[in-house]
Image (tube, rainbow, N blue to C red):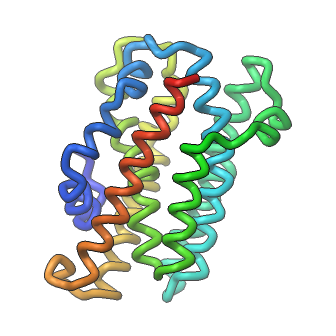
Amino acid sequence: MTDYGRAFAKWREAAGDHWPAYTRHPFVQGLADGSLPRQAFLGYLTQDYLFLIHFARAWALAVTKAETPEEMRLAAATVSALVNDEIRLHIDTCARAGLTEADLRTAEEAPANLAYTRYVLDAGHSGDLLDLLAALAPCVLGYGEIGARLSREATSDTYAEWIGTYAADDYQALCRDVGQLIDGAVARRIGPDPEQTPRWPALCRHFTKATKLEAGFWEMGLAE
């Protein structure tokens, strides 16, 4: 089990069965054994490109919600990783299949994509940094957990590039940094015993809702 900090472990536990429904979804298993149809993968990448645009904006919002320079640095580093690394992976992979960046940029957002990205952005605009981080965490840290596991368990190299991106040392380091950001934000805003505060259940709900929306994103991919 990946260790990305105390708050993440508690939120993952609070999500119950929704967490494995996301991280061990049939789409993910198809990545592991190579059985995922290529068309489904490309459809997912197209939607995920659009998702990452909004996700980067949400992390940029985290910079404005931050209270310390260190929080700002960690949030800004995540924006950089999204824009310069993850989005580039999507562009390069789709280009090899004949899809240009213009094709990705002009694709129509699927309802599952709209629901997820707008939920995260609304959590950030209507709440503080903690509300935003709870909604952001399932994507960043969930992909880290998935990548680390599939790097050990994958039985096919069909999707090795995708798996390698999220299993790579730099992405795993990013996940640990985000976990540190979350733990620091929790301690700074609601103290050393967060589970005893009235804020904690709402943060767990944000995390669980975003986890369910992540599973819906995989379902959207399979529908392609």
Q: Quadrant of the C terminus?
A: top right
In the image, residue 108 lies at what x, y percent? Answer: 74, 39
For the residue pair 111 and 212, the one nearer the viewer reads as 111
Q: Can you name the residue that lies furthest to the front here?
A: 111
For the residue pair 175 and 105, the one nearer the viewer reads as 105
In the image, residue 116 lies at what x, y percent? Answer: 52, 53
The quadrant where residue 23 appears? top left
Q: Is residue 205 above or below residue 92?
A: below
Q: Is residue 122 above or below residue 220?
A: below
Is 51 situated left or right of 176 in this image?
Answer: right
In the image, residue 221 lies at what x, y percent? Answer: 53, 29
Q: Is residue 210 above or below residue 222?
A: below
For the residue pair 205 and 191, the one nearer the viewer reads as 205
Residue depicted at x 58% and y 15%: 38
Is residue 119 visible in the rendered structure shown here? yes
Q: Quadrant of the N terminus?
A: top left
Residue depicted at x 61% and y 17%: 39
Q: Is residue 70 above or below residue 12?
A: below
Is 180 situated left or right of 49 in this image?
Answer: left
- How many numbered marks does the figure carry? 0
